[in-house]
Amino acid sequence: MILPPTGYLPAVRKLCDEFGALLILDEVQTGMGRTGKMFACEHENVQPDILCLAKALGGGVMPIGATVATEEVFSVLFDNPFLHTTTFGGNPLACAAALATINVLLTQNLPAQAAQKGDMLLDGFRLLAQEYPDLVNEVRGKGMLMAIEFVDNEIGYDFASEMFRQRVLVAGTLNNAKTIRIEPPLTLTLEQCEQVLKAARKALAALRVSVEEA
């Protein structure tokens, strides 16, 4: 999980405009409020030509994906819409779930909540990283999309196992456990944030003992 440096997306937007290329952003994981904004590109006020969405768009109950584009991009389909076809596109039940999801995100202001709670968790994880520099290399993230990078894969696997024992579900990045993803639901309460941090502290303490005894 790598965060682009400040100014990166605006620079890419500028290059695309300069050379007539389309800026396509994949926000399947970062969209729908996950990073503290409805879409991650909003952090730098960048508007893509094409935006890809899925996963959280279905509210956790329906499979759905969306390709959102500017009118200029979609204009090529006006005369021949069969340039882009799908088997299950426009499924009414999936679309109803997506509309309900968007409504809840906006009416309950969940992106702003993700920003607030994400800052709280990141601050807590960074304090733990300072206490356990022998185990943790770095903590990074934005909103409710966070990563803890450990010194090696084995420590990452063991951390995930310890968190599981405390009923906190975390995961590596694909097949790499050196970096563990922390991606709580946007509806996480402040009390639950504290529970996650307490679980992480206990897990790291247990890992240090295990490493010292090895």
Image (cartoon, grey):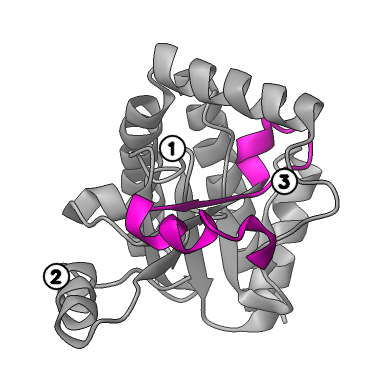
Horizontal and vertical percent for residue 120?
Answer: 34, 36
Report if residue 61 is visible in the image. Answer: no
Q: Secondary structure at mark 1?
A: loop
Q: Quadrant of residue 171?
A: bottom right
Horizontal and vertical percent for residue 149?
Answer: 49, 72
On whether residue 75 falls in the magenta region, the answer is yes
Q: Nearer the viewer, residue 39 or 149?
A: 39
Q: Which residue is mark 3?
A: 169
Residue that sits furthest to the right in the current view: 87
Q: What is the three-letter code of the residue carrying label 1?
A: Gly
Q: Which residue is mark 2?
A: 7
Q: How crowded is the residue under tag 1: few (<14 C-alpha within 10 Å), some, or many (20+)?
A: many
Report if residue 183 is visible in the image. Answer: yes
Horizontal and vertical percent for residue 1?
Answer: 48, 70
Q: Which residue is mark 1?
A: 33
Question: What segment is highlighted magenta in the picture?
Answer: 55-83
Horizontal and vertical percent for residue 24?
Answer: 42, 69
